[in-house]
Image (cartoon, rainbow, N blue to C red):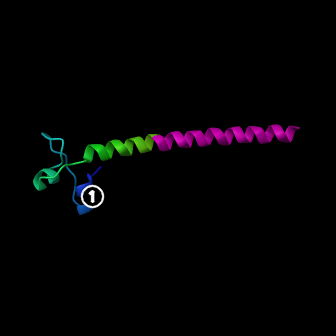
Amino acid sequence: MPCTCCFRSGKKCLMSADSARCSECIRAKKSCDSTRVASSLMNLMKQEKKLENDEDEASEDLLKLHEEMAAL
């Protein structure tokens, strides 16, 4: 996951082994948000999965209710 600086400049974002910044941000003497970007993406992916599961459960509940109504 590229940091914002690398993403905007179209450069490859390679994390430095001895720093929390990528090599491009170190070279440009800028702060690097690569770890925050990756963390935010993971949180969004977890939220998306939960919403998909919630939607599946709601669809199943709705189907059961339709079946119960049809049986009346």
Q: Alpha-carbon neighbours of circle 1 within 10 Å: few (<14), some, or many (≥20)?
A: few
Asked if the stretch drawn in magenta spans residue 64, the answer is: yes
Q: Residue at the right extreme? A: 72
Residue 44 located left or right of residue 54: left
51 inside magenta stretch: yes
Which residue is rendered at x = 72% and y = 41% of the image? 62
The residue under the point 23% across, 57% down is 6
Q: Secondary structure at mark 1?
A: helix
Q: Position of residue 3 (x, y in %)?
A: 26, 51
Which of 34 and 64 lies nearest the eye of the viewer? 34
Where is residue 49? Give x, y as percent. 50, 41
- Against 9, residue 46 (above or below) is above
The quarter of the picture where the C terminus appears is: top right
Left or right side of 16 for 44: right
Highlighted range, magenta: 47-72
Q: Quadrant of residue 11?
A: bottom left
Q: Main SS type for the magenta part?
A: helix
Mark 1 = which residue?
Answer: 7
The image shows residue 20 at horizontal and vertical percentages of 18, 41
Which residue is pictured at 77% across the width and 39% down the height?
65
- Which quadrant of the view contains residue 67? top right
